[in-house]
Image (spheres, rainbow, N blue to C red):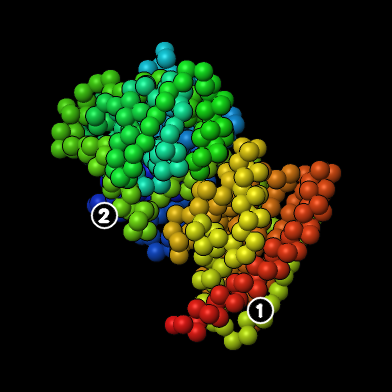
Amino acid sequence: MKVLLTGANGYIGRRLKQTLLDEDVSLRLLVRNPKSLDSDLNVEIVQGDTFDMDSLEHALEGIDIAYYLIHSLQHEDYKTLDKQSARNFLDAAIKQGVKRIIYLGGLGVKENASKHLLSRIETGEILSSRPDKIETIWIRAGVIIGSGSASFEIIRHLTEKLPVMVTPKWVNTLAQPIGVDDVIAYLNAAKDLRIDENLVVDIGSEKMTYKEMMLGCANALGLRRWILPLPVLTINLSSYWLNLFTPVPYTVARSLIDGLSSEVVVQNDNAKKYFSQIHPIRFEDAVKKAIKEMEENQVYSRWSDAGGVGDRWEMQHKDDPASAVLMDRQTSKLDGISKETVYRTFCSIGGEEGWLGYDWLWEIRGWIDKMIGGAGLNRGRRDSYHLRIGESVDFWRVEDLIPNERLLLYAQMKVPGKAWLEFKIKGDELVQTAYFYPRGLYGRLYWYILTPVHYLVFRNMIRSILNKAQNDEETT
């Protein structure tokens, strides 16, 4: 069996990829940036995306089963992009003789669906629209609970930070959550299902309100919480509330909140009928498992690992910050400290480790970013010690990673332009460079106003990295 996996760098895709690697299949991945994958993967890799028909057709050539795990939620025009992406994928799959498409969408009824849920439903309808040419198994899930999932991150952050929660009336909306491991089990089993027609499979565990989920999460965390629903809270206010108290930026929070007014419950019994061997775990058990993975630093993927379609400027320049017109560069001798230790030190910044000095300034910048709808600092990082290309570090994204040589971060905070932060070991020197490509006059004013802050923060940062690296070497 030849299998194509799209969205291999996303939250579900990374986990499904590991499961498929343990199966007796020939696996191929379609990714925009091959460097974001582990170098030791025994898979075929095709660089491209669903908006490039040449690369898409090449990726689907000779494929039996194609997984479609693509969503452009973090892009403003995600609904249009999702439709075009699905059409392209369907056309290319039919042209290349693919036998089956497996798609993970969302629960919901089209007549009452929010814009976000409607987009997921329309994507499934497009992929299922040619049953005479290709089979489609459309798996529909609601709230996915697992370490690093957007739903779990929101529920956990609200529950941990707010002893008393004043919430809108959507907390009484019904949903059927499901553990991420069960989602992966259904997706994996779908490739082996013997069926000769399209199939829609709704999956979920027990039926609960969002209020019950938050109280269940509190119980799993050993906390007591009180929830007070107020009907006067609007979608906008709720979105800002989530933006401030959870790692989710405003644009994503708005789409998710908009969908919380719609019930996401199972509409058919096809999960039991066709996948009777899978028994979804209870909500609280899924929460406890996610918490355990976090405590043991075993979070394998996060919702922010892969965003939507980037703009073309970013796609063309992400590995070339030298095209920036403004920069702050600091250099310092290694003074006998090994490259391995220095590399390990600057790769540990962010998250709980902080930014090695002036953390209060970083916190202010993070809150400002949150207030204007950005990612803020509280995304943290997936792992305290290891990085991989494409994942988040607070309000940065890892763009390049060369062991014992280079770390390149791309700014995802709200800035009037494009910004990078690079750490590079050249010979016996550490070179730390902040690059900025300003957008118009305001972009240049922004940079020059912050020049004194940059001088303090970046000059201190490189010293702190080397001091910490030296201390680590002396204590090992």
Identify the disc placed on residue 429. Answer: 1
Spot occupied by residue 136 in the image (x, y as percentages of width and height): 33, 29
Spot occupied by residue 53 in the image (x, y as percentages of width and height): 53, 38
Q: Secondary structure at mark 1?
A: strand
Q: Residue farthest to the bottom?
A: 336
Q: Is residue 264 left or right of residue 161?
A: left
Query: In the image, what residue occupies the spot 30% across and 36% down?
Result: 216
- Badge 2 crowding class, 10 Å Cα cut-off, few under 14, some 14 to 19, many 20 or more, is few
Relative depth, front residue between 42 and 290: 290
Identify the disc placed on residue 122. Answer: none
Relative depth, front residue between 285 and 266: 285
Dot 1 amino acid type: Glu
Query: In the image, what residue occupies the spot 43% across and 58% down?
Result: 383
- Sequence-wise first label, 1 or 2: 2
Query: In the image, what residue occupies the spot 15% across and 38% down?
Result: 277
Residue 331 in the image: above or below residue 309: below
Residue 168 appears in the picture as rendered: yes
Residue 81 appears in the picture as rendered: no
Q: Is residue 453 left or right of residue 108?
A: right
Mark 1 touches mark 2? (CB < 8 Å) = no
- Badge 1 crowding class, 10 Å Cα cut-off, few under 14, some 14 to 19, many 20 or more, is some
Dot 2 amino acid type: Asp
Q: What residue is shown with label 2?
A: 22
